[in-house]
Amino acid sequence: MKLNKLFLLAPIAVLSLTSCGKQVRYSEDKYIVNYNSAANAVEYASKPKAPFNILQLSDIHFTYLADNEYHFKFIEKTIEAANTALQSTGGLHLIVITGDTFTFATKDTIKSCCNFFEKQKIPWTITFGNHDEQGYFSVDWMTNYLTQLSKKETSNLLFVDYPNDDIFGSANFVIDLHDEGTHKSDNRQIIMMDSNRYNYGEGMGYDYIHTDQIDWYERMFNYIKNDTNRSGSLNPTSLAFFHIPLPEFTDAYEKADKDKSKFQVSDIYDREGQMVQHDFQRTNRGEDESSPKVNSHFLDRMAKCEIDDQIEEQPIKRYYTQGIFVGHDHVNNYCVDYDYNQDGTRDITFSYGIKATNTVYYDEAYLGGQIIKFYPQTIQTDLILHKYSQMEVK
């Protein structure tokens, strides 16, 4: 969310950005958590024409000052609606929370949030936004709590963090859909990254994805691409989730505004999971992008991670990461296909999620969540939209 909206509301807290002590280089496999390790991992078809269904929630802003039970009910309705809307393709497989889950929070706030999502009996995961550290706890306490929760056999949380690793930020990890049992041929990944908090040096404002994180991303790509245990699998493909949009989001929107075909279209579902609008063009830009002033050129490196593939027996090149999904700017929810190389041969999807609650600032017409149907070679996004006023009558 905007720096000038809530930055000064941060409580007196321990805002440690990195852990002290010797940093360790962990092997790539340590950052991979298998989807089927979740207690209630949902069976899904791993065929090319079957999607892995994701619900993205963003910018919840749970606080100890608010009635979070009220927001829990709203989010639960979003989850139920997503499950209903996705019945024909196997239901909801994963909930991804893309940052600013907490603001002005306590340890009990975090625990109650985790308890809520655990009760949904659906695998879920979380990355951090610029406000999540602004609470009455240390960063290490929060990441340790999430780590220990994820290790319980009964937990549905998919999460990895090493406080002493050599990668900037917290909780950079991969959720792998490849499984030596049920989904041996499936080679899709969910990349979770920390877009960090505030930059108090060069380019004052929001922080950015740092070079060592980008190096880690490239190492993970090469590790997965060359993993001999995946022989016979489909070529790897991934989606990336983090909180703060890359600087290129602005360029992507402005180019799509001139060529409307670059805006993706979505179906819109109501709080009952019933479709209310078909092929809604995702053009809504309610505010300027609050991207970092420093461009660490993550997209440039991402674009070098290419795959030789084919569609209908025609050879093509495509990016390893098909789409980037963010939050942060509460009243943006556009979705564009960005022609990074400007050659017309491949695109990468840039998409804002939908604000999950009516906290801080919001557009009442766009509250709920974003459905992402993740196919091995394509992405389809749909929206769950509903209002708090409907909670009183239904």
Image (spheres, rainbow, N blue to C red):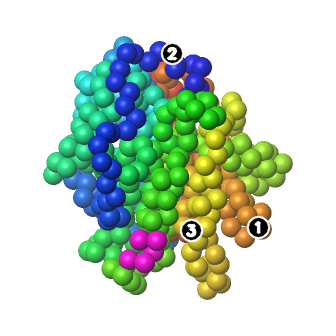
Q: Which residue is mark 2?
A: 8
Q: Residue drawn 71% across and 43% down?
A: 250
Q: Which residue is mark 3?
A: 305
- Label 1 SS: loop
Instruction: Find residue 45 and report its image quarter.
Output: bottom left
From the top left corner, tell me how far across and down residue 136 is, in percent: 31, 21
Q: Mark 2 or mark 1, which is nearer the start of the sequence?
A: 2
**In the rendered image, the vertical position of residue 99 relative to residue 112, given as above or below:** below
Q: Which residue is mark 1?
A: 344
Q: Residue drawn 65% across and 84% down?
A: 314
Q: Which residues are magenta?
A: 222-227
Q: For the residue marked with disc 2, what is the amino acid?
A: Leu
Q: Is residue 151 visible from the viewing direction of this image?
A: yes
From the top left corner, tell me how far across and down residue 178 is, in percent: 35, 69
Cα separation, mark 1 vs mark 2, equals 44 Å
Q: For the residue marked with disc 1, what is the amino acid?
A: Gly
Q: Mark 3 or mark 2, which is nearer the start of the sequence?
A: 2
Of the 4 image quadrants, the one containing the C terminus is top left
Depth check: give the residue in front, 250 or 351.
250
Depth check: give the residue in front, 393 or 296.
296
Are there few (<14), some (14-19), or many (20+) residues within 10 Å of tag 1? few
Give yes or no for contact between labels 2 and 3 (Cβ–Cβ under 8 Å). no
- Label 2 SS: helix
